[in-house]
Image (cartoon, helix red, strand yellow):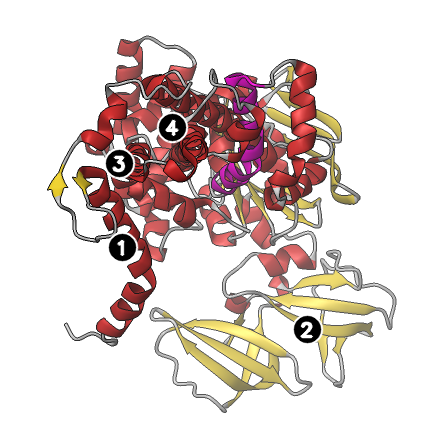
Amino acid sequence: MRISIENFTKAFGTTTVIKDMSLEINSGEMLALLGPSGCGKSTTLFAICGIHRMNSGRLLFGERDVTRISSQQRNVGVVFQNYALYPHMNVFDNIAFPLKVRRDTRADIERKVKDIADLVHIGELLHRKPAELSGGQQQRVALARALVREPDILLLDEPLANLDAKLRLEMRSEIRRIQQQTGITAVLVTHDQVEAMSMCDRIAIMDQGKIMQLSSPKEMYEDPSSDFVAGFLGNPPIAFLEGVAAEGGMRLANSEVTLPVPAAINLPDHGAAVRFGIRPEFFQPDNDLKIKGRISFVETQGREELYDVTLENGSVLRSIQSQGGSFKLGDNVNWGIAGDRILAFDAAGNRL
Amino acid sequence: MRQNFRNWPVLLVLFVFSAPLLIMLTFLLVDAFTTKVPGTMVPSGVTLHHFRFLWTDLDNGSWGIWGVTLNTFNFALFTSLAVTAISVTAGYALSRLAFPARGFFLGGLIVLHAFPTVTLIIAIFLILQLLGLYNTLIGVIVVKAALELPFGIWVMKGFYDTVPWEIEMAGVQDGASRFTVWWKLILPQVQPGLMAILIFSFLSGWSEFILPMVLAPGNDAQVLSTYLATMLLDGGTQADFNLFKAVGLFYALPVIIIYLVFQNKLMNIYGGGTKG
């Protein structure tokens, strides 16, 4: 089901958390609300499910205006960060609760709970209490409970935050599989860019109650609209170079070095501040746009190695290279930037 | 396993301080079942004579031990039911709902909790007279329940505060009304608190003395504590202390049994709930 949020404003007391936000989520799509803590992503999620009332604006599920409709009547499944399983009920009763509330027949309930439990692979745990389950299993129960009454929309509030690293990988693909298998419209709230990029069709990146950019993960990574978006996506993160626009390119701050700028980028007037964003994979020994520096940090990551290179003016560039390079801490290097992959931003952080 | 501390010094101190209590309890037990020559400490024979109040009328104006016991039981039971029912709902409201003057109610609760209730007794007396509830069991039940409530509500609020907010929201998202959520999902989580309030207020009602004595001095509403008191007062210096002890034992027996049966549940009130 399509979700449209129109001119959504939410304030708690005198603090306005979200101002005049609009967002369209397509039917069957999985969308991530990504952002640092306090950016309003959970507030948006709770507005969609009806826990928070909107101060102004409209919320539509399909063609139905649900702005003033109570949570109970919205038919939205929610998976909470701590799963919120009912501790006094066993897994079966937990999953069956939404159906019992709806007064389904006993036979219907048994069949539906069985089906959904098989879908999330917890068929053999139905008689256990939540306290007797591992984190990943609790997560699956929470998913099953949210999905069992076939909601129009599935909301996930940081669903992987309480899992350990290995389980997180597993549940990442599991949640995506279940979402695709059921074809449900899903909204995922997360502060982890890897989660957002790997699980979702589109990402809405938020900061201070505003949506900074809304696009597919690949597009957002390659074509960020601002330095905030560029800095938020990517691991290891992008490195920024400060400078000013000058004849023939950007002159680095505190330095005589001038980097030529690709033709696609329109630089502002001479003397205006600019920032270059350079991702670690585009700063490599054999690229053409050479720049001198010293290796100031080496991090071995197994398959790859991450180098920090301090330039002569003090700024730091990162480079990620496959294992086997013979570079050591303290080496003076003259590596190159892939000129066509430079991301340029103006003083306000907007993409040039 | 080696212990960090030796036990016996602690035990000794505890024993010294509880010895008077133990001695009194022992003599309560012994004297209730034995006869003694006046002036001696050692019993001279075993008897059930002191328990004659159970099967004969003592002819002291009251309507017999069983009627009084029934009164006491009713008093304790209905007080505890009222206190529990109201605490369980009011505690939820104070813990979860945003209603006007919530802060005022919370503050008021603490003040009332710490308030020496005896000072209210004249006002209560006047109110009961006005309502026509003076000298009735219902009147005492209402007053006792009202005075027990601040404690009950406060404890229940503490228990509700420990239930995660998300469980409630999950229930609402699952399509259940707020009432169903409270009844089916939240109440089971605070059940230890509920049990503790039920038992505590029952015991408190069972042992209440001042309120029945002042507010219901007549024979119809007599409870065991006032029955004991009249026994002493009527007897004057001639009071039968062995009889008194036997009645006392009879009176204390339910309390002891309840404590033995429910002691684990009663400990919950200190472990699980009360915060602040």
Kind of residue sitting beneath label 4: Arg
Provide the secondary structure element on which disc 2 rests. Answer: strand
Contact, mark 3 vs mark 2 (Cβ under 8 Å): no
Q: In this view of the protein, can residue A28 be seen by the observer?
A: no
Q: Position of residue B110 (x, y in %)?
A: 62, 44
Residue designated by label 3: B257
Using the numbered discs, state the Cα–Cα distance from disc 1 to disc 3 in whole angstroms: 20 Å
Q: Main secondary structure of the magenta part?
A: helix
Considering only order in the chain, which callout, 3 or 1, is on the residue closer to the N terminus?
1
Q: Chain of mark 3?
A: B
How many other residues sit within 10 Å of disc 2, few (<14), some (14-19) or many (≥20)?
many
Q: CA distance from mark 3 to mark 4?
A: 44 Å
Q: Nearer the viewer, mark 1 or mark 3?
A: 1
**Contact? badges 1 and 2 (CB < 8 Å):** no
Q: Amino acid at mark 3?
A: Ile
Q: CA distance from mark 1 to mark 4?
A: 60 Å
Residue placed under numbered mark 1 in the picture: B23
Chain ID at mark 2: A
Q: Secondary structure at mark 3?
A: helix
The image shows residue B219, relative to residue A273, as above or below, that is above
Which of the labelled discs sits on residue B259, or is there none? none
Magenta-colored span: B135-161
Q: Is residue A325 above or below residue A122?
A: below
In the rendered view, tell whether residue B192 sits above or below residue A209.
Answer: above
Element type at mark 4? helix
Neighbourhood count class around disc 3 (C-alpha, 10 Å): few under 14, some 14–19, many 20 upward: few
Residue extending farthest to the top is A105
Residue indicated by mark 4: A145
Looking at the rendered image, the quarter that the N terminus of chain B falls into is bottom left
Tell me the distance, in whole angstroms, between the alpha carbons under discs 2 and 4.
Answer: 49 Å
